[in-house]
Image: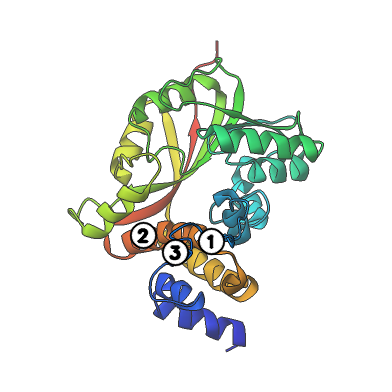
Amino acid sequence: MPERASRTAVVARKPLLARIRAWIGGGKPPKPAAAPQSRAGGKSAEAEPVFAPLSRLTVAQWLWGDGFLSPGDAAYVLDLVKPLGLSPATSLLDLSAGIGGPARVIAQAFGTYVTGLERSPERAKRGMEMSTAANLGKKATVAVYDPETLELRANSFDCIIGRGATYNVVAKERLFRVAHHGLKQRGQLLFNEFMVDPTAGERPELAAWKAKESYPPRLWTLAQYTDCLSSLGFDIRITTDLTGAYRSMIVSRWARMLEEIDLKAMAKQHRLTVIDEAELWMRRIGALEKGGLRVYRLYALLNKPSR
């Protein structure tokens, strides 16, 4: 077995969060130190060094690659969209744009015009800045939106994609109705999504993951997704369980980052940001392993009447 693969296997056996905490020199995240006091009771002239905050967006890109905030690099995205048959004549809507990495990869590879939508204003702003800097300000746009109130022009897109775009949406059926309205007659819908195993029941690992998410998850089962899409007129062609592969990507990327980034050399504030990001992903792993959380890919075609 190659040395890197062997190290990755060790990480898979040992909880990553514990390894990260040990890596930076302690069993628990370090607490900010109080400023030393002088004998007279006043503040010491020597203050703790002040560092610019480390952005969670930066840590995420250390993990997943420049412009990417979740598992799946450029090669993964290009493989994901293979069924769509993209070309410069294709119009594509991405409902999970993040900071635009996938949109830019697709635009560069196929010449496709990609409209990226992102729920977080911070991510949307940063993503549009990055697209503009890459001379893709028109071909890979990123704008903020609310998936609960989204409206689309009729027959305006050939394809709609998403990666974790719906699991925390309350009005899922409404969102898919809007997607149906916005797709052309032979439009394509492709997304990877968190879903829940209906046989799992209430698990503490799932509750722990939900508590860490920015938007409360409103999980559906695979059957709920397929029933909803079928009722709207979608012909579902692919339903693939990606749970194992998704978990493996999380583990391998964290293992790589531990090898490439010197966490012990970081400022305390920066180490805490890394630990906070690690806790989110370790809770996701826990939910995937024991909490009944699944990741599925769905690919569907729309055959609505021409007008």
Crowding at dot 1, Cα within 10 Å, few <14 / some 14-19 / many 20+, comes out as: few
Q: Is residue 244 toward the left or the right of residue 143 in the image?
A: left
The Cα–Cα distance between marks 2 and 3, rounded to whole angstroms, is 11 Å
Name the amino acid type tagged 3. Arg
**Which mark is drawn over residue 208?**
none
Q: Earlier in the sequence, mark 3 or mark 1?
A: 1
What residue does disc 3 label? 247
Looking at the image, do the residues carrying marks 3 and 1 touch, with CB atoms under 8 Å apart? no
Callout 3: SS: helix
**Residue 197 spot, x, y in % from top left:** 26, 53
**Which mark is drawn over residue 283?**
2
Quadrant occupied by the N terminus? bottom right
Disc nearest the viewer among 1 and 2: 1
Disc nearest the viewer among 3 and 1: 1
Q: Is residue 262 toward the left or the right of residue 105 in the image?
A: left
Farthest top residue?
Answer: 307
Looking at the image, do the residues carrying marks 1 and 2 touch, with CB atoms under 8 Å apart? no
> Is residue 10 something one can see in this rendering?
yes
Name the amino acid type tagged 2. Arg
Q: Earlier in the sequence, mark 2 or mark 3?
A: 3
Callout 1: SS: loop
The Cα–Cα distance between marks 1 and 2, rounded to whole angstroms, is 40 Å
| 200 vs 287, nearest the viewer | 287
Q: Earlier in the sequence, mark 1 or mark 2?
A: 1
Q: How many marks?
A: 3
Name the amino acid type tagged 1. Ser
What residue does disc 1 label? 44
The Cα–Cα distance between marks 3 and 1, rounded to whole angstroms, is 48 Å
